[in-house]
Image (spheres, rainbow, N blue to C red):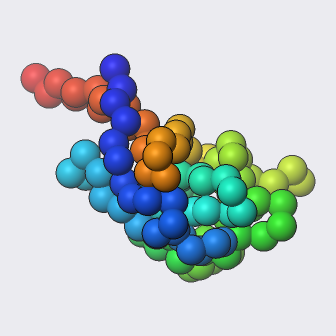
């Protein structure tokens, strides 16, 4: 099951710069506006678990570089660039919708872990 959560207005997002949001109490995401498109990804780098993806650099091919170590991930798919070796992790991406100049992000319900 999933729900959409309202984050902000489109006009609140600077072009090519990220903003950090905490949703569902324990999920950090980074939201970017590139031109007219909005992208939402995990704010936690899958390589070193740093929580600074919102402060990363977005290049012309829509790859986001982690500000800590420079690994790149696609804003669209979360995958590393073709030819990149040494990292198989993928950055989690989130579906985004725009309604009345408001940015909404899909948040999936987390599966409960049972410990016996």
- The quarter of the image holding the C terminus is top left
Residue sitting at 17 percent across and 24 percent down?
114
Left or right for 38, reference 43: right
Residue sitting at 44 percent across and 59 percent down?
9
In the rendered image, the residue lying farthest to the left is: 116
Nearest to the observer: residue 42 or residue 45: 42
Residue sitting at 89 percent across and 54 percent down?
83
Left or right for 3, reference 18: left
Left or right for 16, reference 96: right
Q: Where is residue 99 in the image (x, y as percent from the top left)?
A: 48, 42
- Residue 104 seen in render: yes
| Total tally of numbered discs in the picture | 0
* 24 lies above or below 64: above
Nearest to the observer: residue 114 or residue 96: 96
Q: Where is residue 33 in the image (x, y as percent from the top left)?
A: 61, 62
Residue sitting at 69 percent across and 63 percent down?
34
Q: Where is residue 102 in the image (x, y as percent from the top left)?
A: 44, 51
Nearest to the observer: residue 34 or residue 76: 34
In the rendered image, the residue lying farthest to the right is: 83
Left or right for 116, reference 14: left
* 110 lies above or below 68: above
Q: Position of residue 51 (x, y in %)?
A: 42, 69
- Residue 53 seen in render: no
- The quarter of the image holding the N terminus is top left
In the rendered image, the residue lying farthest to the front is: 100
């Amino acid at each position: 099951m999933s729900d959409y959560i309202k984050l902000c207005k489109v006009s609140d997002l600077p072009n090519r710069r990220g903003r950090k949001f905490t949703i569902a109490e324990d999920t950090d995401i980074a939201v970017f506006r590139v031109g007219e498109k909005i992208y939402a990804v995990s704010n936690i780098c899958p390589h070193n678990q740093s929580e600074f993806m919102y402060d990363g650099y977005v290049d012309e091919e829509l790859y986001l570089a982690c500000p800590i170590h420079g690994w790149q991930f696609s804003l669209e798919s979360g995958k590393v660039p073709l030819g990149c070796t040494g990292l198989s992790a993928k950055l989690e991406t989130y579906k985004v919708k725009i309604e009345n100049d408001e940015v909404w992000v899909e948040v999936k319900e987390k599966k409960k872990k049972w410990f016996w």
